[in-house]
Image (cartoon, rainbow, N blue to C red):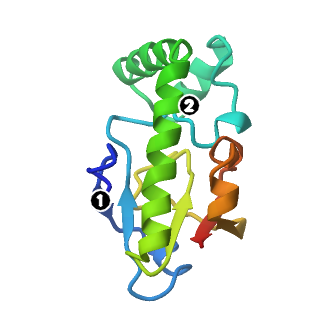
Amino acid sequence: MLTKHGFGCRPFQNNFILKQIPKGGQLVNTTVNQCDCGSVIASASHTSNRDIQPNDIERLKRKGWSETKIKNWTESKTKSNTQAKERNKEHDQWTKFLEEVILENIFGKGGLYIQWYDDKMEVEEIVFNSREKVTLTELKGDLLDKLNYDILYEFIP
């Protein structure tokens, strides 16, 4: 279903997350490319529309990013700053996907967690700051833009 809506679908394991969700829960990375830096998800909480600052590059270097990875990120970010139509398209993709999941109760429960990983996804020590329930009505507005990092969002009808 993720692929149908234009997302990546790469299952992964992270014991820190698995301890915080119901038994039998599954984790899936929806990223298609290297990262989702220009994503509409949580876009209001970061400054994706501003120019790249020197401290952005320094932060990535401290995280151990290679020059090639930083160059790719810079090109991706520059391109994403000019793609408002793509953001609207992605917003629609997420809305339609989550609406389908919620209305058809496909997974039982569905959640979304936004994380800027400092390490590999499988070993990053992740602790949810909180959990918030999101209704279908809330989802249809501009909520996707306003989601925050480190919160598990659980989608309900």
User: Going 46% across and 13% down the picture, which residue do you hit?
Assistant: 79
| Quadrant including the N terminus | bottom left
Q: Is residue 38 visible?
A: no
Residue at image mark 2: 62
Camera-side residue: 71 or 131?
Answer: 131
| Label 2 secondary element | helix
Q: Is residue 58 above or below residue 140?
A: above
Asked where in the image residue 116 lies, by quadrant, the reply is top right
- Percent x, y for residue 119? 46, 49
User: Going 53% across and 67% down the picture, which residue do you hit?
Assistant: 111
In the image: residue 52, left or right of residue 74: right
Name the residue type under label 1: Met
Closer to the eye: label 1 or 2:
1
Q: Residues within 10 Å of mark 2 (few under 14, many from 20)?
A: few
- Disc 1 to disc 2, how far (Cα)? 37 Å
- Percent x, y for residue 41? 58, 42
Camera-side residue: 22 or 2?
Answer: 2
| Quadrant including the C terminus | bottom right
Asked where in the image residue 100 lies, by quadrant, the reply is bottom left
User: Going 34% across and 48% down the picture, which residue do you hit?
Assistant: 5
Q: Residues within 10 Å of mark 1 (few under 14, many from 20)?
A: few
Residue at image mark 1: 1
User: Going 48% across and 71% down the picture, which residue do you hit?
Assistant: 103
Camera-side residue: 9 or 18?
Answer: 9
| Label 1 secondary element | loop
- Percent x, y for residue 92? 49, 41
Q: Is residue 141 above or below residue 38?
A: below
Q: Residue furthest bottom?
A: 23
Camera-side residue: 92 or 11?
Answer: 92
In the image: residue 105, left or right of residue 42: left
Name the residue type under label 2: Arg
